[in-house]
Image: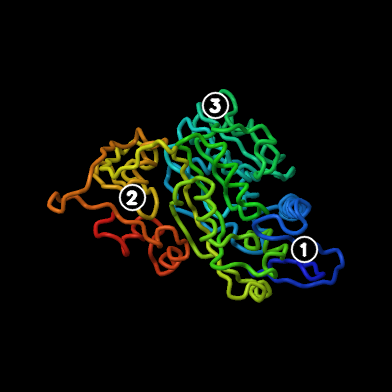
């Protein structure tokens, strides 16, 4: 039984692979608030949204099969064998309560300190805890007691499974908008990840601010989430099922880009995107013409003093799981040993982040037309637009650098 607006509950059942709904009168319904910020009800409205989300993920959903839509299980990038092997080691009970909308596996992880915002049952945390190794550490934060308890239950299991002498993962209960309240300090993590959770927050700007605060200089926020192609009407934003299933709180993707840069991050780098279909007929009527995508972005915290100069870079091929090529975003795929000229911002990111030791980087001035060097690819709207990329994927393209080749310079990959 799932709440919906308009004085109804929605009873959900799965029949022959198709979800059906039946509306039943109820006077106990509560509406959700605005998708992005404090409403006229102020903090009380935020609290109400938090409580509704806790109820949805802590009590109503007991496994992936309980989801009404498939927004939260949309696949991300293709998996390497390196990642697949780590995923196989995660306990079945943890994986069965996974509700993410992409697989969050950034590269170059050994020894990193990682924070997972909205860690749920801990699937991504445990997988990453194997990949960072015994010298790295992963912290998961979730506000839902039931999910935290499931995650903590298997700490010893995974420590033994990975052959570690002591745990390299912990789980904290708290709000991702207020990480300071649970003791997370400034400049303390190399990576922040989040998997289909930011859209559930009533204050997305606060989430990105906190992520920026706890990241070290050169750190990265690598995350998947759901985005909308337009401002969502109240009927969508206040619908409990649509909010709980990650659509009601989806940001307009252009608004996300603006917030990220305002907080201090560099221009968001789009990694992957795919359409989110809504097959439930009753929910389709509520959504109307609104369209949604699942997208993975990477945001970097580059210190102001880092030089920003066009550069010639060569990938050394030493990142585990990506030795032949490193698919950085849809603009850049770096093949081992190949020289690539990159723009100022990309050069600054590579030089100041955990990728610095994985590249030979040489600053250069303007490239002479007769030098034979390929000029850096100029940023275009398609480089950050997840709807453009999802359309390309739907037409049989890919979600990596090759997708951008069709609109950028020849020889992109």
- Quarter of the rendering occupied by the C terminus: bottom left
Percent position (x, y) of residue 163? 53, 28
Q: Which of 75 and 3 is in front in this view?
A: 3
Q: Which mark is residue 31?
A: 1
Percent position (x, y) of residue 395? 40, 69
Q: Residue at x 37, y 46 (%)?
A: 345
Dot 2 or dot 3, earlier in sequence: 3
Q: State left or right for residue 42 relative to residue 236.
A: right
Kind of element beneath mark 2:
strand
Badge 2 density bin: few <14, some 14–19, many ≥20, Cα 10 Å: some
Distance of label 1 from label 2 (alpha carbons): 45 Å
Question: Compared with residue 403, is residue 150 higher up or lower down, i.e. above or below?
Answer: above
Distance of label 2 from label 3 (alpha carbons): 33 Å
Dot 1 or dot 2, earlier in sequence: 1
**Disc number lying in front (1 or 2):** 1
Q: Name the residue under label 2.
A: 333
Question: Compared with residue 296, is residue 339 higher up or lower down, i.e. above or below?
Answer: above
Q: State left or right for residue 65 relative to residue 162.
A: right
Q: In which quarter of the image is residue 93?
A: top right
The answer to whether residue 153 is seen in the rendering is no
Question: Compared with residue 23, is residue 323 higher up or lower down, i.e. above or below?
Answer: above
Kind of element beneath mark 1:
loop
Distance of label 3 from label 1 (alpha carbons): 47 Å
Q: Name the residue under label 3.
A: 164
């Amino acid at each position: 039984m799932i709440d919906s607006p308009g004085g109804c509950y929605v009873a959900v059942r799965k029949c022959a692979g198709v979800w059906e709904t039946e509306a039943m009168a109820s006077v106990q319904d509560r509406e959700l608030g605005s998708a992005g910020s404090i409403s006229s009800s102020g903090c009380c409205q935020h609290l109400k949204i938090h409580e509704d989300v806790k109820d949805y993920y802590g009590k109503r959903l007991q496994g992936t099969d309980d989801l009404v839509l498939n927004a939260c299980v949309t696949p991300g990038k293709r998996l390497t064998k390196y990642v697949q092997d780590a995923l196989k080691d995660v306990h079945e009970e943890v994986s069965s309560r996974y509700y993410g909308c992409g697989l969050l596996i950034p590269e170059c992880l050994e020894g990193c300190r990682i924070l997972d915002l909205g860690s749920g049952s801990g699937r991504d945390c445990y997988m990453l805890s194997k990949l960072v190794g015994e010298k790295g550490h992963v912290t998961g934060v979730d506000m839902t007691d039931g999910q935290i308890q499931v995650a903590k239950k298997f700490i010893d299991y995974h420590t033994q499974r990975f052959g570690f002498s002591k745990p390299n993962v912990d789980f904290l209960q708290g709000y991702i908008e207020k990480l300071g309240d649970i003791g997370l300090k400034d400049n303390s993590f190399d990576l922040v990840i989040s998997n289909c959770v930011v859209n559930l927050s009533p204050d997305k700007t606060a989430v990105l601010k906190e992520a920026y605060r706890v990241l070290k200089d050169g750190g990265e926020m690598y995350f998947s989430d759901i985005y909308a192609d337009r401002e969502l009407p109240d009927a969508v934003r206040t619908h409990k099922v649509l909010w709980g299933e990650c659509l009601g709180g989806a940001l307009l993707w252009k608004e996300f880009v603006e917030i990220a840069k305002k907080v201090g991050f560099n221009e968001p780098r789009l990694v992957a995107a795919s359409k989110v279909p809504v097959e439930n007929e009753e929910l389709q009527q509520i959504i109307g013409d609104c369209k949604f995508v699942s997208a993975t972005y990477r945001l970097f915290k580059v210190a102001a003093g880092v030089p920003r100069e066009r550069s010639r870079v060569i990938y050394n091929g030493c990142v585990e799981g990506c030795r032949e090529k490193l698919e950085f975003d849809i603009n850049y795929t770096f093949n081992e040993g190949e020289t690539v000229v990159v723009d100022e911002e990309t050069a600054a990111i590579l030089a100041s982040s955990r990728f610095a030791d994985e590249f030979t980087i040489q600053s250069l001035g303007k490239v002479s037309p007769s030098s034979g060097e390929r000029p850096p690819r100029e940023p275009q709207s398609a480089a950050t637009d997840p709807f453009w990329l999802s359309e390309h994927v739907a037409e049989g393209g890919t979600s990596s650098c090759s997708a951008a080749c069709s609109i950028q310079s020849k020889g992109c990959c």
